[in-house]
Image (cartoon, rainbow, N blue to C red):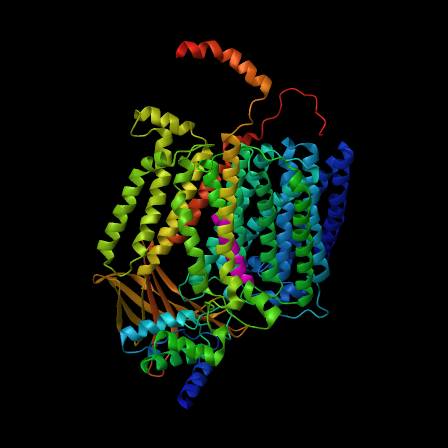
Amino acid sequence: MRALGKLALLIALALPGVTHAVTPSEMLKDPVLESRARNLSRELRCMVCQNQSIDDSEAPLAKDLRLLVRERLTLGDSDKQVLDFLVSRYGEFVLLKPRFEWHTLLLWGVSPAVLLIGVFALVMMARRRSAVIASPPALSEAEQRRLSTLTGPSSANVD
Amino acid sequence: MIPELGHYALVLALALGLVQAIVPLAGARWHDTALMRLGSSTASMQFVFVAVSFLALTACYVTSDFSVSSVFENSHSQMPLIYKVTSVWGNHEGSMLLWVLILSLFGALVALFGNNLPETLKANVLAVQYWIACAFYHFILLTSNPFLRLAQAPLEGRDLNPILQDIGLAIHPPLLYLGYVGFSIAFSFAIAALIEGRIDAAWARWVRPWTLAAWMCLTVGIAMGSYWAYYELGWGGFWFWDPVENASLMPWLAGTALLHSAVVMEKRNALKIWTLLLAILAFSLSLIGTFLVRSGVLTSVHTFASDPKRGVFILAILVLFIGGGLTLFAWRAPMLKQGGLFAPVSREGALVFNNLFLTTACLTVFVGTLYPLALEALTDEKISVGAPFFNLTFAPLFIPLMFAMPFGPLLAWKRGDVLGVAQRLMAAFAAALLAIAVTFVVTGMSSALAPFGIGLALFVMAGALTDLVERTGLFRLPLATARMRAAGLPRSTWGTAVAHFGIAVTLFGIVCQTWASERIVALKPTQTVELAGYDLTFDGMVQHAGPNFRELAAKFTVRSGGVPIGVMEPSKRSFASRGTTTTEAALMTRGVSQLYLSLGDTNDDGSIAVRLYHKPMVLLIWLGAVVMMLGGGLSLSDRRLRIGAPKPATKSVLQPAE
C-alpha cells in the first residue's frame, strides 16, 4: 500500500491537471484479466470527479482504484467479488449503475411502469373507440318501422 | 461608457417587456385592436435594445475592457479575436444575455412574420413570450449583470478557461440556445391557446415551423457538443451521459415527440391535448436544463459560476412557468374538444407509438439525471447514475422505436394495413438481413449483438428510401412519370425520409464503435506502434508557441502499408495566465473513420505514454445529425408552411363561441 501511495503522489506531482487515464505501466500482462479490469473500470465511479468512470479519469484516486481492481483480479476474485469489495469499502456511490434495491426502485421502475401504463391506456382507448365505431346506437322504433317498410317487399323478392 | 450603454439598453428592454407582457393580453381580452397591435412594435423594439446591449458587451470583450468584471474574469488581451468574441457567451453572465437575445429575436420574428395569425392569438403569444423574457431580464439585471464594473481596472484579464478556447465552443452554445429558446415559442402558443380556450388544426400548422426550426438547431447543437467533447476531452468518447448532456437531450426527445404529434393534430385534428402538453413539456425541460447547468446543482465544465442566489432565482422562474403552465393546462385542457378518430394500426397509431417511446425515453433520462439529487436531498444516501445505467435503460426503448420507423410513413391515415406495409418493406428487410450476414462474416463473432444494430440501421435507411420509391413510383412507372411525381411530392415527405435516414446514419456510426480498437503504450522516439493496419512512428517532440499558450507536441508519421500518409501531432498546451494545461488530441480522418491519438505522461526514461484509437465510421455519428437537420430544413420549406394556413376567402360572419 505504501508503494501505491508513493505512486499516487508521483502522479499528482507530475504535469498539473493533465495526466492520463489508464497508463501502460498499470496494465496487466494477461489480456483476459486486463479486459475484465477495463470493463469493471467503466462501471466504477471516480468519486472525486464529476460523472467520470475510473477508466476515463485522470485523478490519482482513480488510478488507485484501477490498481486495486487489478490487484483483486490477479488474486482470483470474480467480477462480482471485486464490485462487492469496492462497495463495502467506498459505499454504493462507487457504482455507476446502482443496484436494484428498495431505494432505487423508482429509478429502475418508473420508465418500464410508465411504458406499460401507456400501452395499457392506449389499448383501452382503442377498444373503447372501436366499440363506439362497431356498435352504433340502436335504431329508434320509428326508424325501425321506416326501415322495414323500405326493405320489406324487396327482401321478399331476393329470397 | 459602452458598458453603461449596454446596461441601460437592457433596462429599457425590460421596461418595454413589462408593457409587452400586459398590454396585448388586455387588448385580446377587450378585443381592442390598437392594444393588441402594440405588442408587435414593442417586440421588435425590444429585440433592438437587447441587440444593442449584446453588441455593447461584445465591444467590451473585443477591446479587452478589463474594467468590466466579466471581461476581466473571462478574457485575455492576447487571445485571438474569434475567442474574444466567443468568450462573450463562454461565461455565465454573457450566456444569459445570449439567451435573452435569442428569446427576443424569436419574439420579434413572430411579430414580423405572424401576420396570418388570428389577432388575439398573436397578441396572447407575444404577451406570454415576454413573460418569459421579463423573468430572464430580471434574472440578469438582479443576479448576473454582465456590465458590472471593477473599482480599479486590472491590466490583464484572467483568460478564458482553456478548454473552452475552441471553435466547437463558438458554435455549440448559440445553436443549443436557439433550440432551447425556440421551444419557448411552442410554449407561448400552447399557453395562448389555453388562455383562449380554443385550439384547432391551424394552431398546429403555426406552431410546427417554430418547433421544427428549434429542433434543427438543437439537433446540430447537441451533435456539435458531442463532437467537441470527443476531440477536446481527450478520451475519445462521444456521449458521456453527463447531466449537462442529458439536460440538452431531454428537450430534444420531447421536441421530437412534439414534432410528430403536431403532424397528427394538423392533418387529423386529433391528439390536441397531448400536443399541448408536449409543447409545455419541451420548454419546461429546456428551463430545467438551464437550471441544472446554471444553478451549480451540478458542477462541470459547463458551470461557469456557481452562486446559490442565481440557483434560487432560476428555480423560482422554473416553478413559475412550469407550475403555472401545467396548472393552466390541468384547468383548461379538459374544455378542449377532441377530434379525429383512428384505428390503432394507422399513421396516427404509429405516431402515437413514436410518442409513447420518445416520452418514456425522455422520462428515463429525466429520472436517471435527477434521482441521485432527489435521493440525497431526501435520505442523505449517495448513489451514482452513470453511463452503464443509461445504456442499459435507454437503448431498449430506442430499438422498437427505430424498428417501427419505416412502417410509420407507409401506413395510411385512419386505418392502415400493417401486412401490406410489411410486404412493401420486403426489400428493406432483405437489405437488413444481408447487412447482418455480411457483418458477421467480416467481423467474425467478435460481437453477437452489434451486427443486428447494423441491420437495424440499414433497415431504417432502406425503409426511408422505400417510402420515396413507393410515392414516386420509381421502378414501377416510366422514369419520366416518376420524376414528375418526385417533383410534385410535398417537401415534408422528403423531409421525413431524409430525417429518418439521418438518424439511421447516426445509429450506424454508434454501432460501429463496437469495433473501435485501442492501444495504450509508452513509446520512445523512433519506436513504432501498429493499429488497424496503420503504423505510427514517434519522431520526437516539437515545441510551438501559440498566441496565449505554449505547446509541446509529439510528432508521429503515419504509414499505411508502408506508405507515409501523413503526420499526427497530439500536444499539450500550457496556458500561463491560468496555469493550466490541456491535451489536444490529434485526429486523422480516413473516409469517415478516424485515427485518434492523445498524449499521456512523459516518463523518466524519456518515453511518452500515448493512447491510440481507431474509430471506424465515427464521423457518421455527427454526419447523421447534419442529415437530420437537412431533413428538418426540407420539411420547413414545405409549401404549406411557407404559404401558411388557409384563410377564409370572404369575411364570414363569426359564430359565437358557445
In the picture, measured across the screen, residue B525 lies left or right of residue B273, that is: left
Main SS of the magenta part reads: helix
At x 44%, y 45%, the residue is B628
Residue B337 position in % (x across, y down): 62, 35
At x 53%, y 66%, the residue is B301
Q: Is residue B502 magenta?
A: no
Relative to A88, residue B269 above or below: above
Relative to B447, residue B17 above or below: above
User: Can residue A66 be spotted in the picture?
Assistant: yes
Residue B534 position in % (x across, y down): 26, 63
Residue A73 position in % (x across, y down): 34, 79
In the picture, measured across the screen, residue B177 lies left or right of residue B555, that is: right
Compare residues A124 and B343 and report the one nearer the observer.
A124
User: Can residue B526 be spotted in the picture?
Assistant: no
Q: Is residue B364 magenta?
A: yes
On the rendered image, what quadrant is the N terminus of chain B found in? bottom right
Relative to B69, residue B167 above or below: above
At x 40%, y 48%, the residue is B400
Which quadrant of the view contains residue B69? bottom right
Residue B60 position in % (x across, y down): 64, 59
Compare residues B260 and B581 and report the one nearer the observer.
B260
In the picture, measured across the screen, residue B365 lies left or right of residue A67, that is: right
Which quadrant of the view contains residue B378? bottom right
Q: Which residues are magenta?
A: B357-370
On the rendered image, what quadrant is the C terminus of chain B found in? top right
Q: What count of labels does the image hold?
A: 0
